[in-house]
Amino acid sequence: MKLLVTGGAGFIGSNFIRYWLEKYPKDKITNLDKLTYAGRLETTEDFSKNKNYTFIKGDIGDLKTTLKATEGIEVVVNFAAESHNDRAIQDPGIFVRTNVLGTQILLEAAKRQNVKRFHHISTCEVFGELELNEKRAFKEEDPFRPRTPYNASKAAADHVVMAYYHTFGSPVTISHCSNNYGPYQFPEKIIPRFITNLIDNQKIPLYKSSQNRREWIYVDDHNEAVDIVIRKGKVGEMYSIGTGVEKSVEDIADSLLKIFGKPKSYKKYVPDRAGHDKRYLLSTKKIRSELGWKAKYEFDAYLEKTVEWYKENEWWWRPLKKEAEALYAKTGQK
Ligand code: NAD
Ligand code: DAU
């Protein structure tokens, strides 16, 4: 099989390529990535010399580039996006340009090149937020109710993907996943930010609404689910990928302090995120019953493995830490 992975120099996309090249060594993968602040060639270093791997530096929002990149491709997996809520508050425009317009251009190229499957990577955040005490989880058929510039751009992109399916018969699937953690995550996101602060013996900044919670999934679980959706999922369908493992900001902080053997005085409270969604939780009934997938990596064990990875790979994250913290110096969340 010949795949085009977009955003493969970022966190989840690079782990997807690593996973795929190992599991399907005969397949050929092209990675199209613009190399924004979040996309790094260092992140792809370990597989960059694989003979079945090709890299193209380019923007999914450029039709000439995407037409070339989709030539002879059977499956497109679209990870490329601006992915960080705090950055979307600073500059919403780039989120709409990449996540919405970029996705449309990529869909158009895939249509013209008769790509057999366009799999779009989306997020649980399109469904809006749940109350902390609410007794339900988001289902695939729930309406989209995004509340932040990032999740609005992801919801809009999903609508464009479905419009290509209904209008042009494009063979699309979409997956909505919960919060990922694991190696190569940019240190602007909560888990790598807290880990790298603790390695440097710095306090960890909890946003004021620190009882807000997220559903956590190890990145390889996400990528295995995407693999199954690509191979067994039904065209025109959406699938939710989650674990049911919910942790508040306080829980994440406490677990990491325990791993590092540091006291609670390492927690500090900083101003809240504007429009801070309280909670997301996905029902995974559909992917479990229709495709037979369920998450297998246990949270506490894989959080520890993630800490180990950051301890052993300072070469990777240290040059990025300054960029991440410059954002928070601007927002006052430092
Ligand atoms: P990331 O920010 O680590 O990586 C994004 C990658 O996309 C980078 O390599 C970047 O250079 C590239 N990119 C950005 N704009 C581009 C453009 N215009 N053209 C080509 N490449 C471009 O993001 P991530 O955390 O790996 O997320 C990947 C995808 O998964 C995103 O679509 C995100 O919305 C989705 N998602 C993420 C999570 C999570 O917890 N991180 C959860 C659910 C869904
Ligand atoms: O839910 C899926 C989404 O998960 C993905 O679509 C996004 O791409 C991904 O970035 C992530 O979004 P969040 O906004 O949930 O992730 P983040 O790590 O930024 O924040 C997680 C929680 O931690 C949130 O409640 C805010 C809080 N937080 C975050 C940071 C960076 C803090 O308390 N302190 C921090 O320093």
Image (cartoon, rainbow, N blue to C red):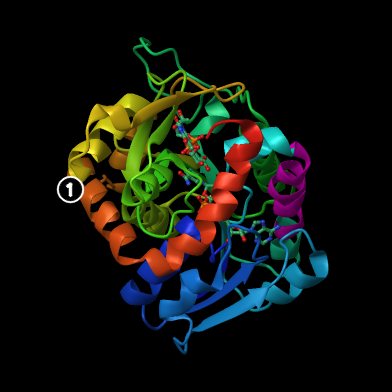
Tell me residue 307's x, y (percent): 28, 52
Which residue in the rendered view is the most extreme toward the top?
Answer: 133
Residue 20 is situated, as x and y percent measured from the top left of the image, at: 39, 70
In this orientation, which residue lies closer to the viewer: 251 or 133? Answer: 251
**Residue 232 percent location from the top left of the image:** 39, 55
Query: Is any atom of residue 96 visible in this view?
Result: yes
Q: Which residues are magenta?
A: 92-106
For image coordinates 73% across by 68% down, the residue present is 66
Note whether 206 is above or below 289 in the view shown.
above
Mark 1 surroundings: few (<14), some (14-19) or many (≥20) residues within 10 A: few
- The main secondary structure of the magenta stretch is helix
Reply yes or no: does residue 303 show up in magenta: no
Q: Which residue is mark 1?
A: 301
| Frontmost residue, 113 versus 241 | 241
Residue 155 in sight here: no
Q: Could you tell me residue 212's position as x and y percent?
A: 41, 21
**Does residue 97 show up magenta in the picture?**
yes
Helix, strand or loop status at disc 1: helix
